[in-house]
Image (tube, rainbow, N blue to C red):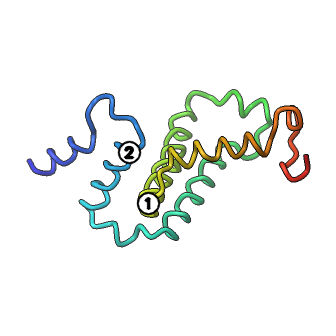
């Protein structure tokens, strides 16, 4: 019964889809399994890289147009790999006490400064080359 209650609590309430709710659910998930001992920043960063590689495998050796038209039968695995990357990133942000939403907003503002529309529109050059 306790296990069922714990699993139900991890399912979260309807509408809980912001990063802080997911972060809290991941905290509970790791704590319940005594996995915090394994969640060092180094290990989590490695896990992000591994999962990103697994995501990339789905697009390896296919043409540009094919990558825009992924067959429906491949989408569930792609979604799982994307979720793995996101979950490990949220966990890393938590361990390092980084507010990912704020970090993303700051990065968007920085990119807007680095890549002004008049210089970067239609260009793949890095900001240092504009």
Count neighbours of disc 2 (C-alpha within 10 A) and say few if under 14, some if 14 to 19, many if 20 or more: some
State which quadrant residue 64 falls in: top right
Task: Please provide percent x and percent y for residue 20.
Answer: 38, 45
Q: Residue at x 69, y 27 (%)?
A: 69
Q: CA distance from mark 1 to mark 2?
A: 12 Å
The answer to whether residue 96 is above or below residue 4 is below
State which quadrant residue 62 falls in: top right
The answer to whether residue 39 is above or below residue 55 is below
Q: Which mark is residue 97?
A: 1
Q: Residue at x 26, y 33 (%)?
A: 13
Q: Is residue 96 left or right of residue 28?
A: right
Q: Residue at x 33, y 66 (%)?
A: 35
Q: Is residue 39 left or right of residue 106?
A: left
Task: Please provide percent x and percent y for residue 72.
Answer: 57, 27
Task: Please provide percent x and percent y for residue 47.
Answer: 52, 61
Q: Nearer the viewer, residue 98 or 12?
A: 98
Task: Tell me the SS state at disc 2.
Answer: helix
Residue pointed to by mark 2: 20
- Residues at badges 1 and 2 in contact (C-beta under 8 Å)? no
Q: Nearer the viewer, residue 36 or 96?
A: 96
The answer to whether residue 11 is above or below residue 47 is above
Q: Nearer the viewer, residue 69 or 126?
A: 126
Count neighbours of disc 1 (C-alpha within 10 A) and say few if under 14, some if 14 to 19, many if 20 or more: few
Task: Tell me the SS state at disc 1.
Answer: loop
């Amino acid at each position: 019964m306790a296990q069922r209650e714990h699993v139900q609590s991890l399912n979260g309430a309807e509408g809980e889809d912001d990063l802080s709710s997911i972060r809290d659910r991941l905290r509970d998930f790791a704590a319940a399994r005594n996995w915090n001992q394994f969640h060092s920043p180094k290990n989590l960063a490695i896990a992000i890289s591994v999962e990103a590689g697994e995501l990339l495998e789905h697009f390896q050796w296919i043409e540009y147009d094919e990558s825009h038209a992924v067959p429906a039968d491949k989408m569930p695995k792609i979604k799982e790999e994307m979720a793995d990357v996101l979950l490990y990133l949220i966990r890393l942000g938590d361990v390092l006490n980084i507010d990912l939403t704020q970090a993303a907003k700051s990065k968007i503002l920085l990119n807007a400064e680095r890549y002004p529309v008049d210089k970067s529109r239609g260009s793949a050059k890095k900001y240092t080359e504009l």
